Image (cartoon, coloured by chain):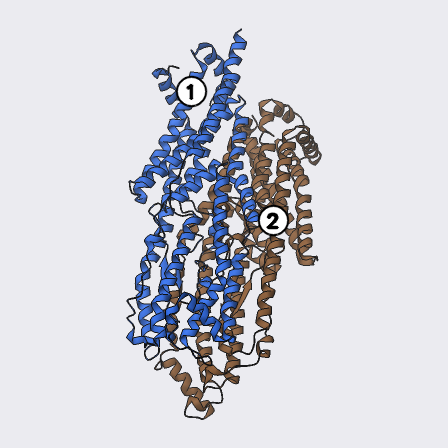
């Protein structure tokens, strides 16, 4: 197939002369700009909150230490909160994902952890329902519409205007003509996407590193899929109205109905009553201990911390050591259902990713969220890091509690600090092969059908 | 305007729709989606409510079976409330998946309502949930578009319009007839289904039918009927303004994208950047600062609590808190509870007002996008809206405060100040406390809350009719 530069040049002129094309590109660029503003806004205010934490933490502990003067650490240690934060990755503003739904900052006490992990952030539920207009939305939902608008009448318009007959008789190869038309359109889409993406990289301050290129790779492969899907519909050789209807139906199916059904399937398949179970269990597990003999509670505690066995715990009166042992025992009782909860959340994620392979829209969104570390996996990792931190904190306070130290003798700045590196920044790899496979399938079917519906058809007529 | 001509055009339109195969295929798909969504939603709500009821009973039983305990231990043992879904929530999921399902109520602390479905979702939820309301709100308009995009433009293309206009019918008669025919088909295909689903589903969930439920179902039916009419008028109008059918289709599909995807999202993100709501840390810090200003119960020299002590001592005519006939510790605690609860209430109301201001943007934009008012009214009538949820938060906080007050009263009168910690009171004390029961927003209040959305919907109805009148008066749209 030889592409004459003259034909290419003519087609470019012809394509960009349409007012709708220029409007559509301008509209999408505008939405892109708004999405960057929005992403920066959401993640920016989260960052502002996170950066306020150290000073809040400092004054909070100062108050606690002040008020606790003259009391034992065992009494005072009940009060302080320790703040943790799930730091956004630099790419979070590009694809906000689940960061607006899940708490990005949790404060914990050294009491039983299970009741403290699921505190929600204050949010407007309607805002959550409607969702974010972030860059990922522009690329995943709006760009396919641009592709549809560019391509639905590629050949059919000329057929409807009667130009195609002339082309058929004059052109050296119809396949080349169609190829040139599609090439021009695809270049326009990729060019627009690149400009919007590059603007995003600059405005959002994304680093020029692996994940940014991965984002771009996923987007280009995703747009290629949509483009070839459009080519497939065109190759059926139907009217413009049919093409538009069919493509919009594809869009609605892939972007709305398929995920809707998949979501029902996932939450039905993997129900999580453990969420409530854990809360109830921990509360009962801990509170029942008050009315039970102290020995079994202490034994549960000693099983993990035998070094405290040497401190006496009176059977007939309250002691701080016993109090924190009760908290610990309550946590141990809820551990099983808490573990199940985390397992099920991981199962949900795995099932969702399996389903995603069958739907490029879901898949691309998942990959963007994974690269940006804004998916459920990231949140679970954060919760687990908070659990680990909670353990460090408990273990920091146990010695002064059992030693019955006074509050003023404890250095309230030497507590273990939350280490964010453990949670975030591990943007996983995002393979694009499912997008490529779908693109190839659509592309091959398109070529086959084009040959059948346009080329052979012409030959028959000529014969 | 000739009524009998409108009728002839309408009847002809109905016959045309039923003659072709495409509407039948599209309707079958929509019907399947509706039935699937209805069944799935109903199944989910009934299972969910059964689960919530099971845990509610468990928590209540645990509460009743508490042994003798010190009142303040009971105050920290606290109570868990599990949110149940409204009976019509299977029809429209609204905000249900994005708001918490359980809240822990204890002394001194206002906890958030936690464990929302969205928090346990991997993001698939964000594509939108498949509910009957989603199908009716988003896909039925598309169905009407596919059914009617050619209704007038097609007549122009094949020249029939000119023949019709040469006869007695005015252009307005034709547009009105076309609209009537299309909307009659839509109503016939969907309204009976909506009514049957609403009443059947709600009765199966609750095992009873009451006047309020019937009224709500009737209103939902009415607003959806109006909505379909508005969409049909727009479709007929655009079809009448277009030179040919494919132009009409492209315009309509583009309009659908803008009104159903782009505007709703932009409206909400715009609202949240116009009215900044505080995040949790800032919210809590503001409350803490105010509480410290009002009175710090931990500080022995705090003027507020010093005054409380002086007044109490004076009232009982003693010189030391140890000699008081009541437990002074409990009194301090209740005073602290009163202060924090009051300040929290004020701050919380402010927060709710900020959210309402954010949501008002989409109410105002309802005058530019007919989907928004319907979405809002539908959520409100189904009891899955913002007001219902903030009402839940307010009622649980009130319940928490009442419960804590009662416990503090027991502490005040039945536990003596000396050796406070070692004492216990009988279990009968908390067995008299009633369990939490949510009082949903009454229908009258719902309608009041929905007033602007209702007005917007009626505005669209009038505007649609006026637009058809205008289009029919323009000669350029007749060619």
Q: Secondary structure at mark 1?
A: helix
| Of residues B40 and A351, the one drawn nearer to the viewer in this rendering | A351
Chain shown blue: that is A
- Whether discs 2 and 1 lie on one chain: the answer is no
Residue B111 appears in the figure: no
- Quarter location, residue A241: top right
Badge 2 density bin: few <14, some 14–19, many ≥20, Cα 10 Å: many
Residue to which mark 1 is pinned: A179
Residue A253 picture location, percent across and down: 54, 36
| Of residues A2 and A69, the one drawn nearer to the viewer in this rendering | A69
Q: Disc number at residue B348?
A: none
- Quarter location, residue A71: bottom left
Residue to which mark 2 is pinned: B41
**Chain of the residue under label 1:** A
Q: Secondary structure at mark 2?
A: helix
| Of residues A141 and B434, the one drawn nearer to the viewer in this rendering | B434
Chain shown brown: that is B
Is B2 positioned to the left or the right of A55 in the image? right
């Amino acid at each position: 197939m030889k592409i004459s530069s003259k034909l290419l040049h003519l087609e470019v002129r012809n394509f960009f002369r349409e007012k709708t094309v220029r409007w559509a590109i301008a509209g999408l660029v505008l939405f892109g700009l708004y999405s960057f503003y929005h992403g920066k806004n959401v993640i920016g205010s989260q960052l502002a909150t996170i950066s306020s934490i150290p000073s809040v933490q400092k004054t909070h502990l100062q108050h606690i230490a002040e008020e606790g003067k003259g009391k034992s650490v065992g009494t005072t240690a009940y009060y302080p909160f320790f703040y943790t934060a799930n730091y956004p990755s630099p790419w979070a503003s590009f694809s906000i994902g689940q960061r607006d739904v899940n708490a990005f900052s949790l404060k914990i006490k050294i009491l039983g952890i299970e009741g403290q992990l699921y505190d929600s952030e204050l949010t407007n539920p309607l805002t959550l329902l409607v969702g974010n207009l972030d860059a990922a939305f522009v690329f995943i939902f709006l760009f396919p519409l641009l592709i549809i608008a560019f391509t639905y009448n590629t050949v059919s318009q000329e057929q409807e205007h009667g130009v195609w007959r002339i082309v058929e008789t004059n052109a050296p190869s119809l396949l080349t003509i169609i190829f040139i038309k599609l090439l021009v359109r695809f270049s326009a889409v990729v060019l627009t996407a690149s400009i919007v993406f590059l603007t995003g990289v600059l405005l959002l301050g994304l680093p020029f590193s692996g994940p940014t290129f991965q984002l771009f790779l996923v987007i280009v492969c995703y747009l290629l899929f949509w483009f070839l899907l459009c080519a497939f519909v065109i190759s059926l050789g139907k009217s413009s109205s049919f093409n538009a209807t069919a493509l919009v139906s594809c869009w609605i199916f892939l972007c709305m109905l398929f995920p809707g059904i998949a979501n029902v399937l996932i939450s039905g398949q993997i129900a999580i009553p453990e969420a409530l179970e854990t809360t109830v269990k921990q509360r009962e597990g801990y509170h029942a201990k008050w009315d039970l003999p102290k020995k079994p509670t202490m034994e549960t505690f000693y099983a993990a911390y035998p070094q405290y066995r040497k401190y006496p715990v009176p059977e007939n009166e309250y002691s701080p050591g016993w109090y924190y042992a009760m908290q610990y025992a309550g946590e141990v009782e809820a551990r099983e259902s808490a573990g199940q909860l985390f397992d099920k959340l991981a199962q949900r994620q795995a099932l969702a990713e399996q389903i995603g392979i069958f739907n490029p829209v879901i898949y691309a969104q998942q990959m963007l969220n994974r690269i940006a570390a804004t998916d459920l996996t990231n949140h679970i990792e954060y919760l687990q890091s908070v659990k680990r931190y909670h353990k460090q904190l408990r273990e920091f306070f146990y010695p002064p509690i059992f030693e019955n130290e006074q509050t003023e003798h404890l250095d309230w700045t030497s507590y273990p600090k939350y280490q964010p590196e453990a949670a975030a920044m591990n943007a996983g790899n995002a393979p694009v092969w499912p997008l490529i496979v779908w693109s190839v399938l659509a592309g091959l079917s398109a070529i086959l059908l084009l040959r059948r519906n346009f080329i052979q058809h012409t030959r028959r007529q000529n014969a | 305007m000739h009524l009998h001509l409108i009728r002839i055009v309408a009847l002809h339109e109905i016959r045309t729709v039923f003659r072709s195969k495409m509407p039948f295929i599209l309707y079958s798909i929509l019907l399947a989606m509706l039935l699937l969504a209805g069944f799935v939603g109903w199944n989910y709500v009934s299972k969910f409510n059964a689960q919530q009821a099971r845990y509610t009973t468990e928590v209540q039983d645990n509460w009743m079976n508490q042994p003798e305990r010190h009142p303040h231990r009971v105050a920290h043992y606290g109570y868990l409330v599990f949110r149940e879904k409204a009976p019509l929530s299977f029809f429209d999921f609204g905000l249900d998946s994005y708001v918490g399902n359980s809240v822990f109520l204890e002394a001194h602390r206002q906890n958030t309502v936690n464990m929302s479905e969205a928090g346990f979702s991997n993001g698939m939820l964000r594509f939108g949930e498949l509910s009957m309301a989603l199908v009716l709100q988003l896909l039925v308009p598309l169905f009407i578009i596919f059914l009617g995009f050619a209704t007038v433009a097609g007549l122009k293309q094949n020249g029939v319009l000119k023949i019709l206009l040469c006869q007695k019918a005015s252009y307005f008669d034709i547009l009105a007839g076309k609209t009537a025919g299309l909307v009659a088909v839509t109503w016939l295909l969907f309204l009976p289904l909506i009514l049957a689903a609403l009443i059947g589903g709600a009765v199966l969930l609750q095992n009873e039918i009451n006047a309020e439920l019937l009224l709500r179902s009737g209103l939902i039916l009415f607003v959806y009927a109006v909505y379909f009419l508005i969409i049909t008028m727009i479709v007929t109008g655009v079809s009448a303004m277009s030179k040919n059918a494919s132009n009409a289709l492209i315009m309509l599909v583009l309009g659908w994208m803008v009104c159903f995807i782009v505007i709703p999202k932009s409206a909400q993100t715009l609202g949240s950047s116009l009215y900044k709501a505080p995040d949790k840390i800032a919210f809590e810090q503001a409350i803490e600062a105010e509480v410290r200003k009002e009175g710090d119960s931990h500080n022995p020299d705090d003027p507020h609590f010093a005054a409380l002590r002086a007044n109490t001592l004076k009232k009982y005519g003693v010189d030391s808190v140890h000699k008081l006939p009541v437990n002074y510790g409990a009194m301090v605690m209740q005073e602290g509870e009163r202060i924090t609860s009051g300040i929290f209430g004020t701050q919380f109301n402010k927060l709710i007002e900020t959210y309402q201001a954010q949501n008002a943007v989409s109410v105002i934009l309802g005058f530019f996008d007919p989907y928004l008012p319907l979405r809002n009214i539908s959520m409100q009538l189904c009891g899955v809206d913002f007001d219902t949820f903030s009402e839940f938060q307010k009622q649980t906080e009130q319940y928490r405060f009442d419960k804590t007050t009662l416990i503090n009263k027991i502490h005040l009168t039945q536990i003596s100040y000396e050796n406070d910690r070692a004492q216990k009171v009988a279990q009968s004390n908390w067995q008299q406390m009633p369990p939490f029961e949510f009082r949903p927003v009454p229908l009258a209040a719902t309608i009041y809350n929905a007033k602007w959305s209702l007005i917007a919907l009626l505005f669209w109805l009038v505007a649609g009719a006026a637009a058809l009148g205008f289009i029919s008066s323009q000669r350029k749209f007749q060619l």
